[in-house]
Amino acid sequence: MKSYSSCWIDWKLSPKTMRREAASRFFLLLLLAACFLAMILSGGMNRFLSGKWTVTAILRMATAPEEGRGIAGKAAKLPGVLSASYKDPETSWKEFLLAYPGLESLRTAGGNPLPGYVEIRMRPDRLDETDIRAVEAVLRPLPQIERLLSGGEVLSRLLRAKRWVNGLFWAGFAVLCSMVFLFVFLQERTRACLLSGDFGFLENRGISAKRIASYRALGAAMTGAILSAAAVGAAVSAFVLLEQRLPVIGRVIGPAEDLLSPMSLLSFGLFLLAATLFHAGASLLGWRAAHAVRE
């Protein structure tokens, strides 16, 4: 047998079965790729919480708008900060009335009673207590700031809960991967049993079982690499189309532009590598299980 052609021995011996298995594996890999993409972009609960939770710097009443915008610009340059925006006293008053309608009389008693503030949102991957405290440490000494609001003890509990929820998300993904691996292993074992006569014929012609198993594992790895690459491409394309039609997806999971970030590209590269090894391992274990049945 030629080395390269031997890798596709199962495709030659049972092409219809291999096509059916490839189709089922593609859809399972597509499911895994979609879940993985969502976890990588969103960071679990990180992106959702970073969009809801803010660090608020309440400014003193005498702070000029230029100073407020300057503080916002300074905060936006901090490593863990996603964005920082200055809200002038007039904007503060309008937001107050939206939250508590019917209190317009408070202003007629003596002008606008509310100061301006700076609203700071943390990067999803830097939403932790250390980075929030670092932002506070930079802003607290500024004389224009009256008070910093970041949640106190509530924030600590929320971040602990976030870590638990993210852990559960990844555990669920690991269980899903294990189920897909089991499915692929059973396919490999069943096919190895069905083709045992053909493999026995090759062994009788001097081709060792170890060599056949190695060729089959290499073929499974190449098939897995092709299928996983196609699944990742399909998942990314579907996400880009959905994010354009439903902006809420971008707010909860993440913008499509983040797919091109170095971390995302590295993560997808690791996914492809894992899927390739995943198929090779399932092939070897399936061969071993089928050989044990034959013996």
Image: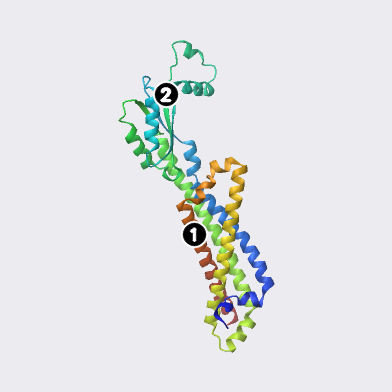
Q: Measuring from the top left, give residue 159's x and y in whole percent.
A: 43, 42
Disc sitting over residue 116 in the figure: 2
Q: Measuring from the top left, give residue 126's x and y in whole percent.
A: 41, 44
Q: Residue at x 60, y 85 (%)?
A: 202
Q: In the orientation shown, which residue stands out farthest toward the right?
A: 16
Q: Measuring from the top left, give residue 245's x and y in whole percent.
A: 62, 43
User: Relative to residue 253, is residue 82 drawn left or right?
Assistant: left
Q: Residue at x 59, y 54 (%)?
A: 235
What kind of residue is marked 1? Answer: Gly
* 237, 145: nearer the viewer: 237
Q: Which residue is mark 1?
A: 269
Q: Quadrant of residue 6?
A: bottom right
Query: Measured along the vertical axis of the image, is residue 224 above or below residue 34?
Result: below
Picture colour scheme:
rainbow
Q: Residue at x 37, y 26 (%)?
A: 67
Query: Measured along the vertical axis of the image, is residue 242 above or below residue 147?
Result: below
| Residue 179 appears in the picture as rendered | no
* 105, 2: nearer the viewer: 2
Question: Please, what secondary structure does the residue beneath circle 1 have?
Answer: helix
In the picture, which quadrant includes the C terminus? Answer: bottom right
What kind of residue is marked 2? Answer: Gly
Upstream in sequence: badge 1 or badge 2? 2
User: Relative to residue 2, is residue 85 drawn left or right?
Assistant: left
- Alpha-carbon neighbours of circle 2 within 10 Å: few (<14), some, or many (≥20)? many
Q: In the orientation shown, which residue stands out farthest toward the top?
A: 109
Separation (CA) of disc 1 from disc 2: 46 Å
Label 1 with label 2: CB-CB less than 8 Å: no
Q: Quadrant of residue 200?
A: bottom right
* 158, 246: nearer the viewer: 246
| Residue 159 appears in the picture as rendered | yes
